[in-house]
Amino acid sequence: MWWQVYGTDAGTGQPITLEVEHAQATGAVQVAMSRKILVRHVAVKTRMKSLLRLLAWGSGAILVVTCGMLLSKLGGGGTVREQIREAHARQAGLLASLADAHGTIGGLQQRVEELNAARQRVAATEQELAKMRLQVADLQKAVTTADAVKGDLAAAKEKLTTSQKRLSQLDMQFKEQTQRVKELEGQAAELAKVENTNKELSGEVERLKEQTLAFAIESQAKNGGTPAETEPSDTHAEGGGGAMRWALTTEYDQAMDFMVTHFSHVGAEGGTTVKNSDGTLTTTAVLPSNAATMRLTHDAEKQRVYSATLMLSLASDGPKAKLAENMQLVNAFVKAIAPASSETEAWIAATIKQLSGKDSAERVMRVGTNYKITAWNNQMGVYAWRIESPRGEAE
């Protein structure tokens, strides 16, 4: 069966009429909705007018045929009247049939209209039902969302409660830590005072150490040294039985340049020059700030150097800055007076470690081609380094 579906295109908004072949009107409506058509009403597609026209033409044809038959009977004799009566009777029957057909067609048209109206009501009801379904779906989504929001709200309330508890704990901890910080700040202030006092005392101790060492060195320099810090010079007979000391390859001017450069008190400026029993001279220079003393034994003509001795503090518990300066000074002394000595710094460090805590009775010697270095410690951290010629040892 064919149906005419009247509605509006959802995309363009234009009115549209769709012809659909389907067994039921609801099927035609569903087809239209699947094509995005908003259905207003549905009507059956009939051909009543064509049927009426056919009936009218059929009645006319019957009249024409009847008239022809009457005319043919008139020419046939006396039974014409009977035939006319029969024709009239047939015509009356045909007219009655035609009237019945008109009545039937009218009833059919009324039923078709009722059916269309019912289908329109069904379509409208389906539209309302679809709207209701959409509303129900929206309500279900809203309910689901509300449930989720309720769950989130409950979780948020629980987190808020936990956070408030944690905040209270942190607040208490903060107050305790603040109080502890105040206590520690007070203790830190006291410690700072103690530390400053310790620094001042350490400075006083360092200054006392320097003054003590400087006084000891100056006293030794003025007194010519003690037996624990000096040794008798080596003498050897040479031709004619006369006594002679062997000179270093380093000349007097070179040795004196080192003394003047590194020591602040030389000769008349605080040092001393004394004459020895063998006719040689010993010039002593001091460096009070480093508690260091240098002795240079040379000839009266100031050309040859027989020995050079450096005494200075290398105590490990002394001022660190002065200890570093004195290490540089002893290295420079050995390199200047015995330039042929190799790996000097390593040997000096090893010697200091070996003599640490020992007295002057224990000596360390290093003999080269044209130098002999003798080192000892007075057990109080004052080390002596004497450089002389090795020729007496070789012979």
Image (cartoon, helix red, strand yellow):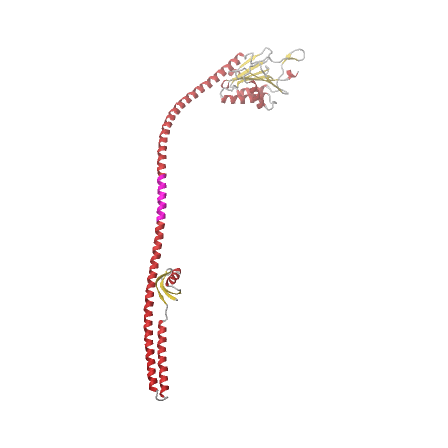
**Main SS class of the magenta portion in the image:** helix
Work out whether residue 302 can be spotted. Answer: no
- Would residue 147 be counted in the magenta stretch? yes
What residue is rendered at 32% in x and 83% in y? Answer: 85
- The quarter holding residue 170 reads top left
From the viewer's perspective, tell me whether residue 235 is left or right of residue 182.
right
From the viewer's perspective, tell me whether residue 218 is left or right of residue 176.
right
Q: What is the number of callouts on the image?
A: 0
What residue is rendered at 33% in x and 59% in y? Answer: 125
Instruction: In this rendered view, identify the residue nearer to me: 85 or 254.
Output: 85
Quadrant of the drawing holding the N terminus: bottom left
- The quarter holding residue 360 reads top right
From the viewer's perspective, tell me whether residue 81 is left or right of residue 358.
left
Residue 353 on image: x %, y %: 56, 20
Figure check: 128 above or below 254 = below
Q: Which residues are magenta?
A: 143-158
Figure check: 111 above or below 288 = below
Residue 49 on image: x %, y %: 35, 72
Quadrant of the drawing holding the C terminus: top right
Instruction: In this rendered view, identify the residue nearer to me: 360 or 333.
Output: 360
Work out whether residue 120 can be spotted. Answer: yes
From the viewer's perspective, tell me whether residue 349 is left or right of residue 10.
right
Q: Which residue is the extreme one toward the right? A: 239
- The quarter holding residue 284 reads top right
Instruction: In this rendered view, identify the residue nearer to me: 387 or 271.
Output: 387
Instruction: In this rendered view, identify the residue nearer to me: 170 or 148.
Output: 148
Residue 266 on image: x %, y %: 53, 17
Residue 197 on image: x %, y %: 41, 20
- Would residue 35 be counted in the magenta stretch? no
